Amino acid sequence: METGVVEHADSYAANATLKAEAACAAAGLPAVGDDSGLEVAGLDGFPGVRSARLGVTQEARHERLFARLAGVPRPWRARFVCTLALAIPGRPTRVFTGSREGEVVEPRAGSTGFGYDPIFLVPEVGKTFAEMTPTQKHLWSHRGAAVRAMVESGALGEITANA
């Protein structure tokens, strides 16, 4: 459900909560909101919570990031972060976070995925997210980790308990 929520907060958790609570209020049903970003260690966590707003297109985002990395010694250590917020009517919103450590690489590699996937290498696998099969990506990704955290917490059982 499109909520029309503007991601103006300074944290993944706050942005995810804004979206989940808006959708929950609009539908009167449980809702999940998410926010994610790429944090590059050599750039003090940039672009972080504003990763999607770094440029209008994927190409523009990559070029702006590589321009900022000019002169920064490699390897370009980074991590992806994803936060999910679960809003259930009449209950406090719960937040779950997952992350994946890796490296920003150039040149780009792979043709699947979106966003920063072709430039984010998972060293344990030796592949970028864009080179992975969907099953591999779900296993190794920050989103997969956040979903697993939500499932393992038992929070989804609250949805059926609320019905």
Image: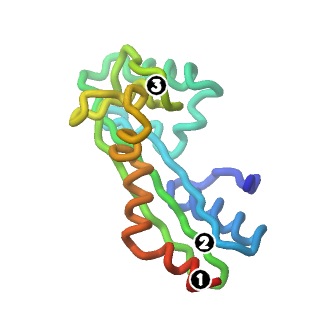
Does residue 79 lie above or below 19 as drawn? above
Q: Element type at marker 1?
A: loop
Q: Quadrant of residue 24?
A: bottom right
Query: Which amino acid does the dot numbered 3 rest on?
Result: Leu
Query: Residue 55 in the image: x percent, y percent?
Result: 60, 28
**Quadrant of image for the C terminus:** bottom right
Mark 2 crowd level (few <14, some 14–19, many ≥20, 10 Å Cα): many
Residue 97 spot, x, y in % from top left: 41, 59
Q: Which mark is residue 87?
A: 2
Circle 2 — which element? strand
Q: Quadrant of residue 137?
A: top left
Seen from this angle, which residue lies furthest left?
124
Q: Examine the rendered structure and indicate whether residue 136 appears above or below residue 107.
A: below
Residue 91 bears which disc, if any? 1
Q: Secondary structure at mark 3?
A: helix
Q: Are marks 2 and 1 in contact (CB under 8 Å)?
A: yes
Q: Residues within 10 Å of mark 3 (few under 14, many from 20)?
A: many
Task: Find the distance from the CA under tag 3 to the CA under tag 1.
Answer: 40 Å
**What whole-number distance in Å separates the C-alpha atoms at marks 2 and 1?**
7 Å
Q: How far across and how far down the image is residue 30, in percent?
A: 64, 72
Q: CA distance from mark 2 to mark 3?
A: 33 Å
- Image quadrant for the N terminus? bottom right
The residue at 33%/44% (across/down) is 140
Residue where numbered disc 3 is placed: 65
Q: Please determine whether, in this image, residue 54 is positioned above or below residue 97.
A: above
Q: Residue 23 in the image: x percent, y percent?
A: 71, 64
Amino acid carrying mark 2 in the image: Ala
